[in-house]
Image (cartoon, rainbow, N blue to C red):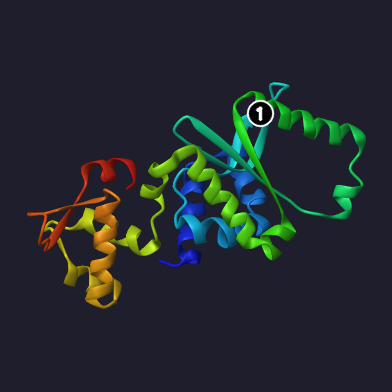
Amino acid sequence: MDFQQEHEAYVSWHQARRSGERLHRLQEGHGHAEKLFLEQLWWPVVGHFQHLHPEYEVKDFQDGTRFLDFAYVRGAHRFAFEIDGFSPHARDIDRGRFGDNLMRQNQLVLDGWKILRFSYDDLTYKKRRCQQLILHMLGRWYGEEAVSVLLTHQEQSILKLAAQSVEPLKTKKVADFLGVRPEAARIWLRRLHAKGMLHPASGEHRVRAYVLNAKAELNWL
């Protein structure tokens, strides 16, 4: 699946699990800038949206609620991603609201959130720099473990195929499913094996078929 298909599925999945104000904020708040963040930064380097929540609700310092543009919640770490536009509204914000926004961010930090902010211009003109920041984040706090979840959309499709297959997965079946040459399918199968997502169906030296790792099925699919 390409980005457009994955993005539609991602938003639909979250919409189906929300109601009331949480659903309204997702429908109204997830707009052009947020989609641009996913398309230009997140998707090219991560390849999926696992652990990433759009318009994520959190309690604020006044016992109310606020919504983060995105929250990446995985293990013991929580990251907030905020997309900041530049507009006359931003320049004309009153002092009370300006101070309130700063206090809200301070509270997030005290509550254990790590905050990354991106300007709309950076999404458009400094994509590579922003992508490197995301990779740095994953590498610093998750180390080698991060590699196992950085799956391309082809690898994701193979895992879904493996989960649906009764028989062990062979190269020809993967190649036919993806519409690629057997050599490409074989490379992706080996990568998934290296990442611990697939296991050889039999033998280790001359692998002809693979089965889904039970841990991968529980934690990823």
Side of 92 where 153 appears, left or right: left
Residue 205 visible in the current orientation: yes
The kind of residue on which mark 1 rests is Val
- Residue 172 in the image: state x and y as whole percent: 17, 72
Q: Position of residue 63 (x, y in %)?
A: 69, 21
Residue at (47, 55) in percent of width and height: 46
Q: Is residue 82 left or right of residue 207?
A: right
- Residue at 59% in and 62% down: 40
- Seen from the viewer's position, the closer of residues 154 and 15 is 154
Q: Residue at x 47, y 29 (%)?
A: 76
- Residue under circle 1? 109
- Indicate whether 73 appears above or below 12: above
Q: Nearer the viewer, residue 206 or 82?
A: 206
Residue appearing at x 78%, y 34% in the figure: 101
Q: On the picture, is 9 further left or further right than 171? A: right
Q: Is residue 52 visible?
A: no
